[in-house]
Image (cartoon, coloured by chain):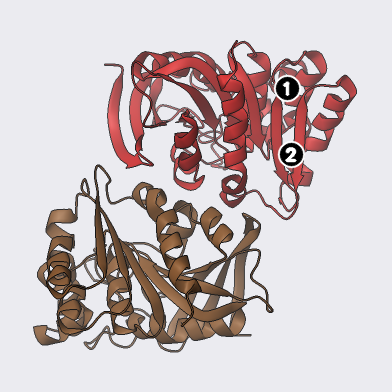
Chain colours: A brown, B red
Amino acid sequence: MDLSHVSQSKVFGGWHKQYRHDSKILNCPMRFSIFLPLNATDTTPVPVLYWLSGLTCTDENFMQKAGAFRKAAELGIAIVAPDTSPRGDSVPDDPQGSYDFGLGAGFYLNATQEPWKKHYQMYSYITNELPKLIEKNFPVTSRKAISGHSMGGHGALTIGLKNQDQYVSISAFSPICHPSIVPWGQKAFRHYLGEDKSSWSEYDATELLKAWSLKRPILIDQGDADNFLEEQLKPEILQSVALQKQLPVTLRMQPGYDHSYFFIQTFIGEHLKFHAHHLSESL
Amino acid sequence: MDLSHVSQSKVFGGWHKQYRHDSKILNCPMRFSIFLPLNATDTTPVPVLYWLSGLTCTDENFMQKAGAFRKAAELGIAIVAPDTSPRGDSVPDDPQGSYDFGLGAGFYLNATQEPWKKHYQMYSYITNELPKLIEKNFPVTSRKAISGHSMGGHGALTIGLKNQDQYVSISAFSPICHPSIVPWGQKAFRHYLGEDKSSWSEYDATELLKAWSLKRPILIDQGDADNFLEEQLKPEILQSVALQKQLPVTLRMQPGYDHSYFFIQTFIGEHLKFHAHHLSESL
């Protein structure tokens, strides 16, 4: 068995479960959580929404705080929430112990710089190792969608954009839309990818939108009372690129909402419906 | 102003807010959380559900993990979540630092023993000081219902039973139904109330049901995969008293569910509907 069982709780007739496994790509043990609706069985497998969390989070934050399972159970969608970085004593962390770089802040990229590159390969983990593991061990189909929050919104947008054959729909809450020009992104990219900024575009949703075509729909919700909006997130720049190229990007500014899980709770049902619609379309 | 503002987040069109105040009854500063639905205004005040949390919790656990606001917003009910004990450096804690007695474990009673009685007066705080503060400062009516989980389920049952003019309906998840005969209850009662067990019955839902009439409905949900069920909770004894006296107590055993917030999440919508029905009845 590739997986060791950590915990399980029944919820809305289905199951929330946590597992550990040894990641070959990340060179460390990793934990993830999965929600399986009641109707997920070997003879009736269900599609999967991958959820990428934000800075400081683990596999637990979304599962405990988003209130997503009622709707996911109703729609018959599994949800997988990975951790936000490699973990363990052997994994290097920011020596300054900051929250926005190192452990809990993997930025869903493949690091090319020392001492990060041995473990910080979250892009390959999310797009390759983890879905293979999930599809081998659980009653799910290969139909996938992707979503996330903040740093995880950046992850969902960049991973979704670069793997449009793999993810049928993409959504994000309060994503870091243009990491190359904001403090969170610049700090992480400088360490993980080096000073050569040409390598940064590969992990910048706005730069990817400029360069790539988009055949999958993107839904973004952003609160206008979000303290990070102006300095870190920049959805208006991503939106202007999308408008110019007439790409299927919907950005909804939600008046009065902040950066918290209370915001996510409010709109996660609509994101699940959005993904369910695309997950159920014939290929 | 009696209250100092701690935080606020918009959620489902309403607001989740946290406040601090100086409690005269508890002799310490206290924090609480309140959810106010969109329709709560000074000209259209709404009724309130008081939620009492379990061991180790604060005002935050239910608000972050129960996924209750979608339904509360729809039904037009405010929710108030107090802390689970007095707090602060001046408040004595269990010298052994256990999780089930002292800070985070006030058991919703009025302590009579030293050194606890100066601060551990949660019964009076919940039934008297807190609702007065809420009704003075927020757009709510005096219509109240009460619910809670585990130790907070014990709190909801005992407080609801003893104050049937104040709370129109009572519910609980996985409550400690007969604290006088289980380890959690015996440990707390011995310290807070002393060795004389005659004083314990006043805070024991099963003993209260034996002695009192019940004009308010009680709804209890209990998971049958709850690790604490057999040793600590004893709903079957409470139910047998209710059946014998033909009291309006509904105990629902929920197959496969455990003691966690995943269980609460699953059934909180039904509890809110139950309370909304009784809160909207004419007196």
Residue B6: percent from left, percent from top: 29, 34
Secondary structure under the numbered disc 1 in the rendered image: loop
Residue bearing the label numbered 1: B195
Residue A98: percent from left, percent from top: 23, 63
Judge left or right: residue A66 versus residue B112: left
Q: Which mark is residue B103?
A: none
Judge left or right: residue A108 versus residue B130: left
Q: How crowded is mark 1: few (under 14 residues within 10 Å), some or many (20 or more)?
A: few
Q: Up-down: is A277 above or below A231?
A: below
Q: Do the residues labelled 1 and 2 touch (CB within 8 Å)?
A: no
Q: Where is the N terminus of chain B found, in terms of image quarters? A: top left
Secondary structure under the numbered disc 2 in the rendered image: helix
Q: Up-down: is B178 above or below A176?
A: above
- Disc 1 residue type (three-letter): Glu
Name the residue at 77% across, 16% down.
B198
Inspect this view and state whether residue A82 appears.
no
Q: How crowded is mark 2: few (under 14 residues within 10 Å), some or many (20 or more)?
A: many
Q: Is the residue at mark 1 from the same chain as the one at mark 2?
A: yes
Residue bearing the label numbered 2: B233
Viewer-nearest residue: A17 or A276: A276
Q: Where is the C terminus of chain B found, in terms of image quarters? A: top right
Residue B212: percent from left, percent from top: 77, 13
- Disc 2 residue type (three-letter): Leu
Q: In which quarter of the image is residue A141?
A: bottom right
Name the residue at 76% across, 27% down.
B249
Residue A281: percent from left, percent from top: 47, 75
Question: What separation in Å lies between label 1 and label 2 (alpha carbons)?
Answer: 21 Å
Name the residue at 55% across, 36% down.
B53
- Which chain letter matches label 1? B
Judge left or right: residue A241 versus residue B248: left
Inspect this view and state whether residue B141 appears.
yes
